[in-house]
Image: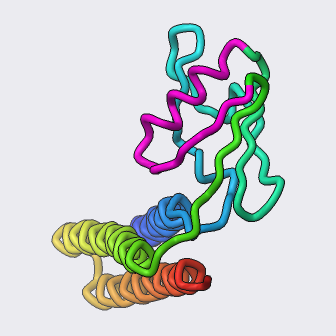
Amino acid sequence: MEEEIQMYLDEAGELMDKAVSHANQELSKIRAGKAMPNMLDGLMVEYYGNPTPINQVASITTPDARTLMVKPWEKSSIGEIEKAIINSDLGLNPQNDGEIVRINIPVLTEERRISLVKQAKGEAENGKVSIRNIRKDTNDSLKKLLKEGASEDAVKNAEDDVQKLTDSHTAKIDSLLQLKEQDIMTI
């Protein structure tokens, strides 16, 4: 029974780590007015009839803090790259010179910054909800072990450990959110 309890605790820790990592990934997609190559992560480009991640058909660099430069490996795909950026929900306006696509990142207005902070808080809350769901599922599994004959003390201690895991992972998401808020609000 002890091994099963430890297995549930280990699994909960791994799943919570993944939830924090996912929240961090989602927060990194929220642009804070600075040009960052990962802003285009998740953008799919039509490449020989197949949707392909943009970073597999072009190199993305930042020559300065307000400009993204997308250099396709094949010049023939430049139009599709431009179309993918225009059709995305990023609100970016690419300029195509036939060889590279330049994207100027506009300075954020105060209103837009506040809206981005709200979006970041929503992503952080989604991460916390995932962690709480993992806690609930793990505690349910521990209660089943109690019915199967595990000692009450062992299950109670394991539930305390799950709560400690939950608290520490929630704190990690809070600190990620705090950093993102500072990043967004810094002009």
Residue at position x 51%, y 9% from top? 49
Observer-nearest residue: 42 or 140? 42
Is residue 32 highlighted in magenta? no
Locate residue 162, reporting x and y percent: 38, 81
Of 107 and 161, the residue lying toward us: 107
Q: Give the residue furthest to the left.
A: 147
Q: Splitting the image into 4 quarters, where does residue 187 fall?
A: bottom right
* The magenta segment: 76-97
Q: Farthest top residue?
A: 48
User: Does the image show residue 123?
Assistant: yes
Residue closest to the far right: 63
Q: Quadrant of residue 121?
A: bottom left
Q: How is the image coloured?
A: rainbow
Residue under the image location 57 percent in, 24 percent down: 52
Tell me where residue 156 sits by quadrant. bottom left
Q: Is residue 95 magenta?
A: yes
* Relative image position of residue 65 (x, y in whole percent): 75, 64
Q: Name the residue at 60% across, 85% down.
A: 186
| Quadrant location, the N terminus | bottom left
Front residue of 64/129: it is: 64
Residue 17 in percent (x, y) is at: 52, 67
- Where does the image place residue 30, in percent across and percent down from the top left? 50, 63
Is residue 18 visible in the rendered structure shown here? Answer: no
On the rendered structure, is 133 left or right of 110?
A: left
Left or right relative to 22: residue 99: right
Counting every numbered tag in the picture gives 0
Query: Is 180 on the left-hand or right-hand side of 146?
Result: right
When the figure is inspected, residue 104 is found, relative to residue 16, above or below; the finding is above
x 20%, y 74%: residue: 143
